[in-house]
Amino acid sequence: MSFTVYGEHPSGSRSKFARDTAAGAVFKAADLMGDGWTGVHISDEKNKIYWPDRFDQLYVVSKPNA
C-alpha cells in the first residue's frame, strides 16, 4: 500500500512526499512537523486522510489481514 504525506512549509509552499509504508509515512510526517511544517497529514491509496491524532490508525490499515 502506498501513502502520501502532505504539508505546508513555513515559507508557505506546499509539498507532498510518497512513501511505500505506513511507518515511512509517519516518520516523514514527524520529521516535517519537527521542522515546523503545518497542515501535515497522510493519505492512503483510497484517499482516506489521516491527521496526526489518527496516525496510529495507519498501522491497522496497512496490515494485509486488517
Image (spheres, rainbow, N blue to C red):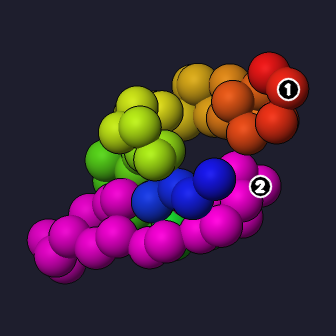
Identified by mark 2, the residue type is Ala
| Residue bounds of the magenta highlight | 5-29
Q: Is residue 23 above or below residue 49?
A: below
Identified by mark 1, the residue type is Asn
Q: Is residue 47 above or below residue 28?
A: above
Q: Secondary structure at mark 1?
A: loop
Furthest toward the front, the residue is 65
Q: CA distance from mark 2 to mark 1?
A: 17 Å
Residue at image location 80% in from the left, 21% down from the top:
66
Q: Inspect this view and state whether residue 33 appears.
A: no
Q: Quadrant of residue 20?
A: bottom right
Q: Nearer the viewer, mark 2 or mark 1?
A: 1
Residue 37: image x %, image y %?
Answer: 38, 63
Which of 14/34 is in front? 14
Residue at image location 71% in from the left, 59% down from the top:
21
> What label does residue 54 carry, if any?
none
Q: Disc 2 marks which residue?
A: 23
Q: Quadrant of residue 27?
A: bottom right
Which of 53/57 is in front? 57
Q: Is residue 50 above or below residue 16?
A: above
Residue 26: image x %, image y %?
Answer: 66, 53
Q: Is residue 16 magenta?
A: yes
Q: Disc 1 marks which residue?
A: 65
From the viewer's perspective, tell me whether residue 59 is left or right of residue 52: right
Residue at image location 82% in from the left, 36% down from the top:
64
Q: Secondary structure at mark 2?
A: helix
> What crowding class fits label 2: few (fewer than 14 Cα within 10 Å), some (14-19), or many (20 or more)?
some
Which of 57/47 is in front? 47
Residue 24: image x %, image y %?
Answer: 71, 64
From the viewer's perspective, tell me whether residue 36 is left or right of residue 38: right
